[in-house]
Amino acid sequence: MIHDILTDAAHVHSLLHSDTNIQEQIQQLADACIAAIKNNHKVILCGNGGSFADAQHIAAELVGRFLKERHALPAICLGCNASSTSAIGNDYSFDDIFARELSAVGQAGDVLIGISTSGNSSNVLKAIHVANAKGIHAFGLTGNTKGAITRTCNCIEVPSNHTPRIQECHILVGHIVCELIDAAVISP
């Protein structure tokens, strides 16, 4: 069983490795993040469950340090303030938790990365709609199920419909973006 899981994971990574279109999309995402950071804007992330953990992870890599020592970079993960999240969920709807927070902290020129393995997470979709309305560059990370997210923003679609493989590749994409950002913002 372990061998089969590793084989499946290696296969999906191999598909990413050979897909120049996905690699171009990753570069576009990194370029948007780099431009935002260089223009005093921020990278904002959101997701649910494992995708929420991935969003927090990538925000932490940017604010803290990825591979090399550098200054802190402006990045936040929506939903980390439990009081706000529970109040918004209670007073409005769980579907509004990210959109409401983004409407408060997001500005034109920022980048939003919405992570949804299915591509159909209502609260991520609502945040993307807010981003589009506010001039925030919205990107999605999803699987290959052609969820609603693919019709709302530029998406990197991991070539799998298996949640663990999708999530593994989302963190890989996040790490690639972090490494590209580091290379662009660190002076030699």
Image: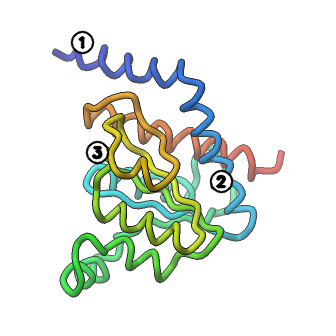
**Distance of label 1 from label 3 (alpha carbons):** 26 Å
Label 3 neighbour load within 10 Å: few <14, some 14-19, many 20+: some
Q: How far across and how far down the image is residue 135, in percent? A: 60, 70
User: Is residue 74 visible in this depiction of the protein?
Assistant: yes
Q: How far across and how far down the image is residue 153, in percent? A: 49, 53
Question: Looking at the rendered structure, which numbered label has been put on residue 187?
Answer: none
Q: Residue at x 34, y 22 (%)?
A: 9
- Please name which of the two marks, 2 or 1, marks the residue nearer to the observer: 2
Q: Is residue 70 above or below residue 97?
A: above
**Distance of label 2 from label 1 (alpha carbons):** 38 Å
- Give the residue type that dot 3 points to: Ser
The residue sitting at the front extreme is 151
- Please name which of the two marks, 1 or 3, marks the residue nearer to the observer: 3
- Give the residue type that dot 1 points to: His
Label 1 neighbour load within 10 Å: few <14, some 14-19, many 20+: few
Q: Closer to the camera, 1 or 157?
A: 157
Q: Quadrant of the N terminus?
A: top left
Q: Residue at x 74, y 48 (%)?
A: 184
**Residue to which mark 3 is pinned:** 118
Q: Are marks 1 and 3 in contact (CB under 8 Å)?
A: no
Q: How far across and how far down the image is residue 54, in percent? A: 38, 50
The local secondary structure at tag 1 comes to helix
**Badge 2 or badge 1: first in the primary sequence:** 1
Q: Closer to the camera, 91 or 77?
A: 91
Question: Looking at the rendered structure, which numbered label has been put on residue 3?
Answer: 1
Q: Report the colour scheme.
A: rainbow
- Give the residue type that dot 2 points to: Ala
**Residue to which mark 2 is pinned:** 32
The local secondary structure at tag 2 comes to helix
Q: Closer to the camera, 24 or 74?
A: 24
Q: How far across and how far down the image is residue 57, in percent? A: 43, 53
Q: Are marks 2 and 1 in contact (CB under 8 Å)?
A: no
